[in-house]
Image: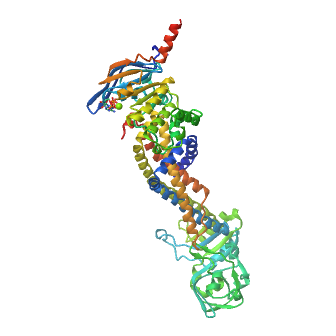
Amino acid sequence: MGDTNGALIELIGLEKTYRVGTEIVRALRGVTVSIHENEYVAIMGPSGSGKSTLMNIVGCLDIPTGGTFNLRGKDVSKLSQSRLARIRGRQIGFVFQSFELLPRTTALKNVQLPLLYAQVSHQRKRALAALERVSLSDRAKHRPNQLSGGQKQRVAIARALAQEPDIILADEPTGNLDSETGEEIMTIFDSLHADGQTIIIVTHEESIAARCRRVIRLKDGLIESDERRGDSLPQAEVSRAVSLAAS
Amino acid sequence: MMLRPIRWLLRLFPWMISVILRNGQNVITAFVQIWANKGRSILTTLGIIIAVTSIIAVVSFVQGFGNFITDMVRGYGTQFMVVRPYTPPERYRAGLGRVTLDLSDIEAVRVECDALSRLTPFVYTGEAEVVYGSEKAEGVPMRGVTEDYQTIRNFYVDAGRFFGPVDVETAAHVVVLGRTLLKSLQCDESIIGEYVYIGGARFRVIGLLQRKGSFGPEDQDETIMVPYTTAIKLYPDLRKSIPFLVEADGEGNIDKAYGQITRVLRRRHSLQAGQPDDFRIDRQDQMVRQFERVKTVASSILAGIVSISLVVGGVGIMNIMLVSVTERTREIGLRKSVGGRRRDILLQFLTEAVVLCTIGGLIGVGFGFAISYLASLHPNMVELDTPWWSVALALAFSAGAGVIFGIIPAFKAAVIHPIDAMRHE
Ligand SMILES: Nc1ncnc2c1ncn2[C@@H]1O[C@H](COP(=O)(O)OP(=O)(O)OP(=O)(O)O)[C@@H](O)[C@H]1O
Ligand SMILES: [Mg+2]
């Protein structure tokens, strides 16, 4: 698995430059960071600092214009469109600020969508299991216009979970919700993390970032700070500490 | 020519269907989309609906009339020919005398041409006047023939008798009436044995012809038949120009009979080697072949018209699909972000176009049948025939239009960049 330190995501000098007419926008100017399995990361920073750009690249929706992005040790920038689509479908789970559920389509069918493209078996069963994890089994037959904002976002989380992805990427998942509902959503993310899920959340709210184990702050396309919360080590390090103590 | 793309589309159709069915989810999505925009979908498919309606209706008419004519031609037998005087176009006419065809020509043909089994002169006027008691029928078609006419044209009496050789020999004043005459003369079958006046002369009614029905606008039962000798006496002006009908002695003798008649008539009319015939021989077997050719041409023209209207319908579909792709940019982005590949998106929108067009096609088939049915209610209409292949062709055409005109919008959808799509308002 490559030369890496076992990181799930490894970014080295990552750059993204947009060209709008004659103007050049450098959204990312050399981001270097590694994220391991079962990390719970918040990405913060002022508007326009490049958070969404970074998420899109990590989610294989976009490709960097410079630097390297290794996903599980594999350089993603060299992959074809359809390989990228495959990665998006099987390894990445997206949660968007504005939910992005298909209208006129039941919650269950929405959750099934990634399974459909991946052509896996037991789609219905898996989709129901994903809805179960966000406590929405009883809304499986409901359409988005019959759901509250918080319920919609839970369906979106279930959709991200359906394929049991390596990483969940959430770009301001509570941005469209009131603080109470946002709290509800964060409780779900917390419990997913407790189950071992790797999660990266973009947020503007310190209270949300405070729940994460690591906070990366961006500014003008560069990492300004990257702090881990000592009080709770990532699971891997805990087990390493345990094994060290045992020896 | 025209048929090649049709055949190609027909072969494409099962393939499309199989691809679509293997991706059933796309069909469901397509129906959900179409149902969500019911009004717009109907308006969009209007062009296809009209195109398919016209395919079904026009094919039904062409087939119906075709069957009618084919049946009729078959009824005559293919050994039958019509010989008539013919004036060639002016520039070929130099040196020709008056164009005539008289009884001596016909007699010569009868004697000299051994490839013929039957022959009858055909003295015709469309202006006979028939009087029975106080009733009067004007402008009645009258045929002066021999008893052979019955066999050649397959037109027999079913009451009384036809006239025989003796009646012809003696120019007897006997007449056979078509069924319509009974109505115009306000009488029934008891008229057999009674007398009528034709052109002022007294005729005995000896038989009634079987009912034949109409051929297009022509009522075949509105006719009277008399011995040709009698007809010539009644209308002496016709004696210089008498067509005649012959029947070859078997299918294999048609060409031989044709050659014999041509030779006899050219000799009798003293035509030189370079001169054109001053008569025409219409061969039934060639008429059948010619008719088949006309049918092919008619189908080709039909296919042309239909493809034009389908293009119009298809452009409508393309237009609305392009709008739909723009409206659903975010959906496309989402689908891509959860693992949809370009080909998945392409197939989804292609399926939608094909489903839309096929629905239009099905509605059109329904309308086509409805129009054919309504038309068949008219009493003078031939029996319309909608063959299964016209339905299959119409549906294949519309599904094909879906593929052709759906491909551009589908491609546009497939290449949308997921990020741009997710930013789309
Ligand atoms: N498609 C694009 N074309 C041109 N410039 C772009 C494009 N996408 C992003 N940018 C620019 O890149 C920079 C970073 O944008 P990005 O969306 O990543 O910011 P962000 O940190 O997510 O901001 P916010 O908190 O407002 O969501 C901005 O200056 C933005 O204008
Ligand atoms: Mg953003």
Quadrant in which residue B210 is drawn: bottom right
Query: Farthest residue toward the top?
Result: A247
B275 to B300, vertically: above or below: below
- Residue B418 relative to residue A163: left or right: left
* In-image side of B55 versus A66 (left or right): right
Which x, y percent locates residue A92?
Answer: 47, 28
Q: Is residue A157 above or below residue B386?
A: above
Residue A36 x %, y %: 45, 19
Q: Is residue B311 above or below residue B419?
A: below
| Between A49 and B382, the one nearer to me in the picture | A49
Q: Residue at the front extreme?
A: A180
- In the image, is residue A17 above or below residue A5? below
The residue drawn where x is 68% and y is 91% is B195
The image's colour scheme reads rainbow
Measuring 40% from the left and 18% from the top, which residue is drawn there? A229
Residue B276 showing in the rendered view: yes
Of residues A125 and B214, which is closer to you in this image?
Answer: A125
Q: Which of the two residues, A183 or A156, is positioned nearer the viewer here?
A: A183
Q: Position of residue B142 (x, y in %)?
A: 61, 82
Image region (quadrant) for ligand 1: top left
- Residue positioned 50% across, 47% down in the render: B32
Q: Quadrant of the C terminus of chain B?
A: top left
> Which residue is nearer to you in this view: A80 or A151?
A151
Q: Give the total number of marks visible in the rendering.
A: 0
Q: Is residue B164 visible?
A: no
Question: Left or right of A83: which side holds B369?
Answer: right
Residue shown at the point (71%, 81%) measured from the top left = B162
Provide residue A55's location: percent of width, then percent of height. 39, 27
Direction left: furthest residue: A22
